[in-house]
Each structure stands twice: as structure tokens, then as C-alpha cells.
Amino acid sequence: MKKITFLLITLLTINLIPAQTPGSESAITSIDAAIPYQGFGEAIAHIGTGEYKIYYDNIDGVLDQPIFFVDGFDPNDTRTIGNMYNLLDFGNSNENLADVLRNEGFDIVVLNFPTYVSSSDNTTEINGGADFIQRNAFIFTNLINTINTMKVGMEQNVIIGPSMGGLISRYALRYMEQNAMTHDTRLYISFDSPHLGANIPIGIQYLFNYVVNGDPGIPEARPLVDGLLNSAAAQQMLIDHYSSHVDASGIEQDNTVHTPKGAANYRNEFQAELDAMGFPQNTRNVTITNGSGIGAMTGTPGMALINHTFDTGPMSLPPFGDINTRVILNINFAPIASQNIKVIDLAGQANFITWFDVFSFKANAESTSFSDGLDSAPGGQFDLNVFDDNTNPLLTEFVQNLNSQYFNFIPTLSGLAISNETNWYANPNTNDSPFDNAYLPSDNEPHLTLTDGNVAFALEEIRGESLSINTNYIVKNEIRLKQNPIQEQVTFLSNKRFENANVSISDMTGKVVFNKNMSIANHTAFPVYANSGLYILKIQTKDNYSLTKKLIIK
């Protein structure tokens, strides 16, 4: 009788909630947090405001398998919801992860944090894309509650949190658990998120601060600098922040401490709160990093990032007329362990008989005794080319003369939340990570890069195919399934050659339907003829690496 009653209630619920046209999209909808948050330096608590859009699946148009995609760090809200969707493009074929999932019946819910005026006082403007992580998390908790009341059926949620979105998601899920709120979520995917902090070279921070607040003073650059460095979220996440190294002028280095130090009242306080909360307990937690799992570096500690002289043209100097000017800029990555070096040396010069300084700025940095500087450590990379939008010739010249296009933005250890290792260059032991499963590439990749490998990992987790078997993490990255489910053909993707590897496939009763020794390299495909169903794929290499996973044959 109970089963019949439950079935009737379910059918009635489905009939009361109209389905959308398969593949349709909702309007962008505003959503307020139910919980206000008062951040450091704020006079009152503010209600956070976000906006979301639902991309319904391409099968039945029923909101029954929600996957949340939560925006990350986006100062000044330059990334729209449509842009966020497009960020899910991957591979050379330019497929889109959201499209793949919608074709399998999942619904994509995209959450953005816009710039808005607080409803708490109707005055304060809040830069949502770089706001306090806690306030954005409270927006997300209300969105989860909202979608849970809208969805049909018993399927639990999946949450993908890229970059800062991974911290927002983690905080929201754990807060709900600690406060008797049901998030009804089965899987949390952190995507290159800074669980132990992020990095921007301190030399670049000094430069940006100086050109806005010192000489020559470029007010047009203030929105960029305020968002990238001085926003609440930036100060919460950056392991080393220039504000902890300058004197009362806010510009000149104070010479009291040169080792990495976060922004006062932001960095340590946020990290302590996050650590005390821990990770969600009622979800499967997995992580994808763009940082190398085998210690590959981006450049070398102490290297010259740029050493260039810019011709800034003539300057009028009555009564002498026009005189030539130039800017000499040297920026270095943070040095090797325990070393103290000059990380920025900037001079603006004019030529009157000889060159002389009109303005100058210098600053040093020192690495800790237990690790070389962060800038060249393994990690998801920041692409400095983003600063060149072809509108400023000096920025174009700056980018063109860089010795490295990238720096370490999200350290690999931070993406894995491995807190017991103090050397940022150490090869990670995924057993030390609190995550249930992890994907690490061999080489460093630009931050938030989707590849065939990490998309296959995410799909396996979302589809519930992972067996949670602790295999060697390098093999997990070096041999991937191109597709799963498959139809008559298995295709491996590998960035390393494995000779004479044993590949076996068996059904759930243990009956072997395929067993062969073969070489696996790059793109390896072979036919498999078996009935539709769930199988176990096993790979054993001559190097004693093993890999076991579920395989679905349609």
C-alpha cells in the first residue's frame, strides 16, 4: 500500500510540474540569499544577490537531474552566464561538456554573481564576482533550496565548482550540513580550486599597485587592480598580498617582512574558517587540477619574468621643449628557498643631456626556508596574455616581451587540499588529500582548461561509474577512456606508451568477455562484442600499474 501511495504521489507531482521543451532554456532569474553576511570593514550585513539560468536536458525537458555550475572569480562581472556555458567547451573537436550531459538527460543550472546594489541599504555597490566567498555561498545555499523544490523525482544533485566557485560550493554544502539544511547532493566536483590559497607573483602585484596609486598614476587601471588584488575575494585567497608588505603610504615597501604573507583580516581568517568547517560529509568529493602531478614547473624560481625598456615617447618640458622618456622594468619570480631578491625594479626616465629618473620603485621578496617561491611551482597556470586586449600599445608591448606567458596561479597542492606538505614543489601523494578521487595531468595546464582526459574523469564521476579504487594517480591520467558508455568499440587515450599491457573486460558475474595483451599509446581503439550492460575493465601494465573501472556497453 505504501508503494502504491508513493507512486501516486510521484505521478501527481510530475503532472503538476509542466515539462519544458527538450533543449529549452529558462530566463535569467535573480535570486537573493536567505542569510545576510557582514564582511570585514562593512558597516552592516548585506543580503547577497545572484542570478541563475536553467538549461533543460535534451531528452524530456523535465528538471529531474540538476547539475549546478557555479561561477568563479570574476571581478567586475565580465563573464556572462552564456560565457560560462561556453567555458565548458573541450578538446580539439570543440565539444561542450554541458551539451554532452544534456544529451544524457541532465539539466544544467548556471549561477552567476553579478555587480549589484545591496538591497540591505539600497546604496552599497557589491562586486559579486569578487565579493566575500561566504556571502556568495549563502546565495548558493538558497539556489540549492530553490532548485530542490522545483525538481521532479528522487535524483540527487551534482555540483561543479570551478576555481573560486569550488570554494563557494564547498562552503555552501558544508554550511548546510552543519545547520540542518538538506542539500540533497551526491557529488561535489572541485575544478582547480584554491583550497589552500592562490598566487599572483608579488612583483606583478607591486607593479599594478604602483602604476595606479604611485607614479605615473593611471586611473583607468584602477578597476582592474581593485578587482584583481584589492577585492574581498582576492584578499581572502591570495597566499601573498602586497598590502602586507607596504608602509603607511600604501605604496612603498616597509622592509619588515618579505616572506609570503596574506592580507590582514582577510586571508588567515578565511582559511581558518574554511579549515574548521572541513569538507562536505554527505557527498562524494572529487577534484580536478590543472597543475602537474609529477612536479613540472612553470619557469624557474627567481627567473626574470620581464627585463625590458619601453620607449614612452616625448614629454613637453617648457622652456626646453620636448624631451624623450622611457620606462625600464624588471620583474623576477619569487626566489629559491631562503633567498631574498629584488622582484621589481621600475624606473621612469627622461633624457635631458643624459637619462635621469623621474620616478622609481623597488621591492624585494624572500622565500620560506621550506619551499622555493610559488610563482614557478606546479599548478594551474595564469595566462598573462589576457591583459592584452589590443587597446593599449604599452600593454601589448609588455605581453610581447615576457619571458614566460604563464605563472603558477593555483598550486597543485592547493587544488588537492594537501595541507601536510609545506614544499609547494613536492610531488603530491593523493592519499594525503581529503578528496575521494582526483585527476592530475602530467604537465601544467592553463587554469580551468578542460581536456579530453579531465572531462572523461568528470563524466565517469557524474554517471556514477567510478569504483573508488585507489589506483596509481599517474596511470589514472595517462590512460583514459575516450567514451563511456561505448558501442562495440573501446578507445583509450594515453599520453604515454605502454607495451604489452593486459586489458580484460568481464561482466558483473565475473565472466570474461575480452582478454588481450596490447600496446596502448596516444589513440588506441579495438572492437568489443558483448551484450548491453555493466562490465568491469581492468588494465595491468608491465610496470605494475593497474587501473580498474566500470564500463557500460550499450
Image (spheres, helix red, strand yellow):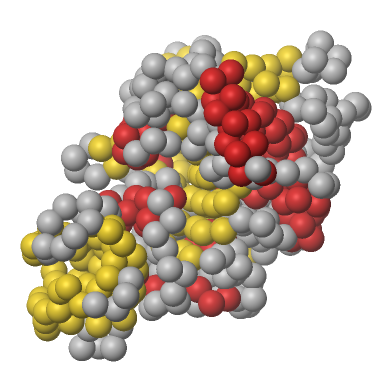
Q: Residue at x 83, y 47 (%)?
A: 179
- Residue 272 at least partly seen: yes
- Residue 352 at least partly seen: no
Say whether residue 143 is left or right of residue 486: right
Q: Quadrant of residue 94?
A: top left
Q: Which of the image's four quarters has the N terminus? A: top right
Q: Quadrant of residue 354?
A: top left
Residue 216 higher or lower than 381, as above or below = above
Q: Residue at x 67, y 21 (%)?
A: 31
The x and y percentages for residue 375 are 49, 58
Q: Residue at x 47, y 69 (%)?
A: 468
Say whether residue 271 is left or right of residue 186: right
Specify the farthest residue to the front: 1
**Residue toward you, 16 or 368:** 16
**Residue toward you, 195 or 439:** 439
**Residue toward you, 504 or 128:** 504
The x and y percentages for residue 521 are 13, 69
Residue 247 higher or lower than 546, as above or below = above
